[in-house]
Image (tube, helix red, strand yellow):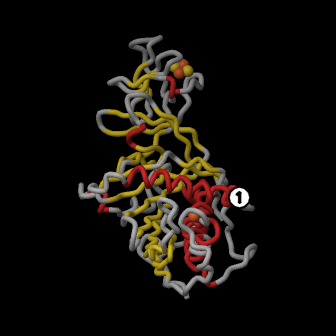
Amino acid sequence: MRSYEEAFSPYWHPVAFSQELKDRPLAARLLGRELVVWRTASGVAVTQRYCAHRGADLCAGEVSAEGLRCAFHGWTYGRDGRCVHVPSQPGAPLPPNAALASYSATERYGLIWVCLAPEPAAPLPEWPELETGKVATVALPRLDWDVSAGRMMEIVLDVTHLSWVHKGTFGNPEQQEVPAYEVERTASGVRAQISYPALAPPLDGAPPKVDRTSLTYEVTFPFAVRLTFKPSLFFPHTVYAIASPWSEEKMQCFYFSSYHPALRHFPDIFVKSELAILEQDRLIAEAQRPRAHPLDFAGEVHVKADRLPIEYRRGVIALRLGRPVDGPTPG
Ligand code: FES
Ligand SMILES: [Fe+2]
C-alpha cells in the first residue's frame, strides 16, 4: 500500500483560484507540503515555501523580474527554484545547493493546478465548455473543511442524502426511496445520472414547488466532479467541485458553477443557496469517522443506492494501491 502522499502526488490538484494570485506571492498547501505560488513572465511558479538559507517565509518576499526575493537576506529564486542571486556576496559562485524544491504548475478553468510528482499520471479534467467563452462562472469562497478529499467527494456523489441532509434547502423529505440508477465507468472516472424531485425554494410565503431535476455526476479521478443540474423550474447550471487534499484527513474544496451569461441574477442566488446547502453537508462530513477515506468496503455497510460513491471509492482504492482504474465496468 502506498502512502497517501505518494499515491496522489502524481495528479493535478488546484491550490488557488487564478484571481487570488496577483503580484504578491501566495501561500498554498498540498499533500503535507507548504508551498509558495507566484507569477512570472513565463507562467505560474510553485516552490517550497521556506527559504533554503535560513527558512524564512517566502510568502513575505517580493516578486521581481529575476524571481522571488526573500525578505530576510534578499536571496532570489527563479521559477525552477534555483537561487539566482545572493546579495551579500555579489560575483561569488552561488552555493550549489541553494535551491528550493519546485513543482509543475498550470492555470486552467480559473484555477492554479499543481502536480508534486515529476510526471503527472493523468491530465486535468476535460471541461471544454468552460473555454468556449459562452458560459459565465461564479465561484464560492474556498471550502476549508476538516474532511478528507475522498469523503468530500463521496458526500457530493451521495444520492440518498439529498432528502435527509438538505431538508429546508432543496431536499425533498417525501422522496426517501432511491430508484435504481446506472453507474458507468469512463476513461477518467465514473458517471451517473439520476432524476430527483427537488423542492424549489419557497417564494413570497408560497409553498415550495417540486422541481423535477436531472442530475448528471461526472467524476475525474481522484478528486474532481462536474455536476450538471437540469431543473424544470430553476436555471440549468453546472457545478464543478474539486477537493484539494492537504493531508489524508483534510482538504480544501474549490467550488464553482457555470451558467448562461444572460442570467444576471444567477450568481447571487447561487452563492446564497449553495452556501446554505454546503453548510448542511459540512456538519455531516466533518463529524464522520474515520476522517480518512476508507481504503476498503469492510468497515461500512453498503446498499444499492450507494452505488455511485461505491464505484468512486473503488477507483480511489485502485489509485492508492497503484493499480489502473480503467478496468472493466464493475458488476
Ligand atoms: S532566509 Fe531567505 S535569504 Fe536568508
Ligand atoms: Fe449534499
* Residue at image coords 60%, 72%: 163
Q: Is residue 102 above or below residue 214?
A: above
The quadrant the N terminus occupies is bottom right
- Picture quadrant of residue 128: bottom left
Figure quarter occupied by ligand 2: bottom right
How many tags in the picture?
1
From this viewpoint, is residue 318 visible?
no
- Picture quadrant of residue 86: top left
- Dot 1 amino acid type: Arg
Residue corresponding to mark 1: 291
Q: Is residue 322 above or below residue 33?
A: below
Decide: few, some or many residues near mark 1? Use Cα within 10 Å; few <14, some 14-19, many ≥20: some
From this viewpoint, is residue 57 visible?
yes
Q: Residue 107, image x and y in percent? A: 36, 47
Q: Residue 56, image x and y in percent? A: 57, 24
Which structural element holds mark 1? loop
- Which sits in the foreground, 123 or 265? 265
* Residue at image coords 42%, 26%: 68
Is 71 on the left or on the right of 66, as rendered?
A: right
Task: Work out which residue is located at the far front of the displayed protein and give it.
Answer: 205
* Residue at image coords 40%, 38%: 45
Q: Residue 110, image x and y in percent? A: 36, 48
Q: Is residue 294 above or below residue 252?
A: below
- Which sits in the foreground, 128 or 296? 128
